Amino acid sequence: MENLRVLVVDDEADFLETVVMRLQRRKIDAHGVDSGKKALEIVENERFDVVVLDVLMPGLDGIETLKLLKQKKPFIEVIILTGHGSVESGLQGMQFGAFDYIMKPADLDELLEKIQQAYERKRLHEERHGLSGE
Amino acid sequence: MASKTELPLNTLQPYISAILIVLAALLLGFTNGPWYFAAGLIPALVSFLGTRELLGKVRKANEQKCFLDEQLIQSQKLAAIGELSSGIAHEINNPLAIIGQESEWVTHLLQSDELRDFKQVNELTDSLREITRQVKRCKEITHRLLNFARKMETLLQRVDVNRLIEDMTKWVERETKQHNIHIVRRFQKDLPQVVTDAPLLRQVILNLLANAAYAIQKDGDITLTTRLADHGQVEIIVTDTGSGISKENLSKIFNPFFTTKPPGKGTGLGLSICHRIIDKLGGHISVTSEPGHGTTFMIRLPQKGEV
Amino acid sequence: MSSVPRLLLVDDEERFRTTLSKLLGVRGIPVAAVGSGEEALAELRSKPYDVILLDVRMPGMNGIEVLAEIKKINPALEVIILTGHASVDAAADIMKLGGYDYLLKPCTVDELMDKIDGAHERKLAREKRKEKASAPQVIAGEGGKPR
């Protein structure tokens, strides 16, 4: 998974730091931002493959961020993160294009597996549209 | 569907052939002795068993064909509705855009200094805000329609079905526990991986689980079964002990915009999208129900992606 | 290179063009509007523009075809596609052809302004980089290093 770049988006500072650090320790090029707005800005300028997104955030909430993310960058795969999502938000998330979801506290191995599958899907998707690699 | 007149003949066929052969054996026995009669019974038995098996296969193939025909008809129906609604949605977005813009322009004009003392400026501005809000609402509706109708792109990956279902179940379980709804897993161990589109399948499972939970409301069970069926297909069964679906509604259950929920509580697109997805994945989805007792959805997926 | 983007609006609905031009006008953005892809290309060949708002569904050339042609005429022009619906296919096409972004109709003027500003910024940034790259290098005492 060289070249894989992961963006974690969560307004909970402690959680964000922990996840990014643990991913980096597993040799993943991971970065974190604490709001949906920042996430949308950063993906505009830097390439990311998988975004791990908290669905319940103040300000630009998770579902809105997901919608805009899939619009601006349709090839980025999003994994929804939630501490206590309702079934409704889960359905919405899937409907608006989330790849998968994981519950907090996130088991690192499980998260890594999902990130890997999401990345695989991104590659397949780009290949199909003739956009292999960047 | 096998017509009512065919069936009796089909069921009698093996018996008729066997009886004829036994009669011939009897004749042979009378003329040539008991051994010839015994020997004559062998072809009778073979004929009886063989014909019965053959007819059984024919009947099964017929059933399968009807099942597929229904699936095909439903898919064609959905495709036609999809195309129609997509055209309409696209058409509506243009006048909506103009309405939105005109109200933004009027809002701007109301902000001019000349109108500062005009008493009803606030009310007018408020009305315009409402128009903008409703335009946004229409936009969401048309976009949902267009989402439903668009070309569904599938990306195939190897998926552990039990794992996928378990993931979606864990999500739903948080809420169902609160309503005393139990989810029972009956997953076949070592179920082979399926090559399919994971997020699309997740949507389907989540949808079925949400529907099951809604049907039960509180105090009940949802049973999830997975198993390997014939022809290497993987079977997923979602059964609930909810209110069930009436016979008239059962035939409409996969229609878009068909919903038994009160207005505003559901678009009615869920199951039609599920049908589209499963169809696109090369599988089949069917439903049976007993009003007052519960409903069962059955999905079959090929192991190797869409046909 | 102005700090206010010069906008060309391409949409086949006349009322949409006139009202949007007024709305952008009061925000200080000069807007020229045409009703078809063919007219847009003619306009682009004769006058300078920065950002183009392009409707995707028009009789004659559709938005994607026009986008491809625009990039041939002047790749520096930023194009925003206005569409009734976004599919991944369309989004991928837009990105591949060098479009800046797309917006779903109906949209508010604020949403439009955000995209227009973003597109204009990108154009200015690219022009700045080009200037830096082609500026003669003057390093005192060492003689200019050829580029």
Image (cartoon, rainbow, N blue to C red):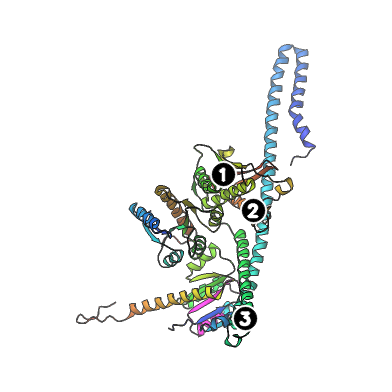
Give left or right: position of B96 versus C97: right
Looking at the picture, how far across and down is residue B71, in whole percent?
Answer: 66, 48
Residue A73 placed where, x, y %? Answer: 48, 64
Q: Do tags 3 and 2 sit on the same chain? A: yes
* First to last magenta residue range: C39-62
Dot 1 alpha-carbon crowd within 10 angstroms: few under 14, some 14 to 19, many 20 or more = many
Residue at label 3? B121
Residue at screen point 52% across, 70% down: C102
- Relative to residue B150, is residue B241 depicted above or below? above
Tell me the amino acid under the disc marked 1.
Answer: Pro
Mark 1 or mark 3, earlier in chain: 3
Residue C49 highlighted magenta (yes or no): yes
Res. B302 mark: 1
> Eyeballing the image, is B198 above or below B119?
above
Question: What chain is tagged by disc 1?
Answer: B
Q: Secondary structure at mark 1?
A: loop
* Direction bottom: furthest residue: B114
The amino acid marked with disc number 2 is: Ser
Q: Which mark is residue B272?
A: 2
Query: Relative to the observer, which residue lies in front, B257 or B158?
Result: B257
Mark 3: few/some/many CA within 10 Å (<14, 14-19, 20+) = some
